[in-house]
Image: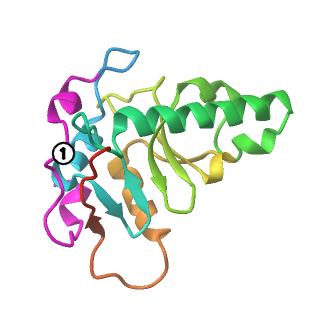
Amino acid sequence: MSVFSSIRIQGAPTLEHVDLDVLDAYRFADGGGFPASYREFVRSLGWGRLFGLWLVYPPVLDGYADGWQARSRILTERLQEAYHDGLAEEFDWMIEPDGDWSLVDSLRVFAISENGDVLLWDTAVRDEHGEFPVYRSQRMNSLWLLGPSLDAASPILRAEALSGEFDFDFEPLAAQRLS
């Protein structure tokens, strides 16, 4: 049983715009696909807001917004630009407490919070299960290792979520077509 089976969903998952072919066929530079925990998350929950805060980008069909293909690429470019500038300026605090400068080029954004934090995979390292370690960067100014996989990081994200009790852990969001 995975940690995602305990996620309380508000209504039905939004899956109609999720591109399951890309979810299964996409390959990273190491030749491996998406980590199993991410694939399970996307298949189970689709598109929405996790723990009242996090937007995990699924691969989407052509013509839809908020997909892995564009959002991850754009946010990763911004993150790497910010960290390369930080390295040039010797802002070593940007990689604290758990990172180092050698990670920057292998980090890939796969989620963003509504307050500007991002979740990242270190795509240069896979464990024996094919999972990437998950980091959080607060406003692209720190690197916190949350765990060896998305399912391992989820309890930490839940604990750090906005205070208060919620009836649901995951709020499906409507698929948005690009104009």
Q: Amino acid at mark 1?
A: His
Location of mark 1 (residue):
17
Residue lying at 38% horizontally and 15% vertically, measured from the top left: 30
Depicted 11 relative to depicted 111: above or below: below
Q: Is residue 175 visible?
A: yes
Residue 142 percent coordinates (x, y)? 67, 47
**Which residue is outermost to the bottom?**
164
Depicted 49 relative to depicted 19: above or below: below
Q: Nearer the viewer, residue 75 or 167?
A: 75
Q: Quadrant of residue 82?
A: top right
Q: Secondary structure at mark 1?
A: loop
Quadrant the N terminus occupies: bottom left
Residue lying at 22% horizontally and 29% vertically, measured from the top left: 22
Q: Nearer the viewer, residue 94 or 64?
A: 64
Q: Quadrant of residue 169?
A: bottom left
The range drawn in magenta is 1-26
**Which residue is outermost to the right?**
89
Left of 145 or right of it: where is 156? left
Q: Is residue 132 visible?
A: no
Residue 159 percent coordinates (x, y)? 45, 70
Residue 105 percent coordinates (x, y)? 59, 24
Tally of marks: 1
Left of 12 or right of it: where is 84? right
Left of 88 or right of it: where is 77? left
- Is 86 one of the magenta-colored residues? no
Q: Nearer the viewer, residue 16 or 107?
A: 16
Prevailing secondary structure class for the magenta stretch in the rendered image: loop
Circle 1: is it few (<14), some (14-19), or many (20+) Cα within 10 Å?
many
Residue 9 percent coordinates (x, y)? 21, 69
Depicted 113 relative to depicted 167: above or below: above
- Is 20 one of the magenta-colored residues? yes
Residue lying at 20% horizontally and 43% vertically, measured from the top left: 18
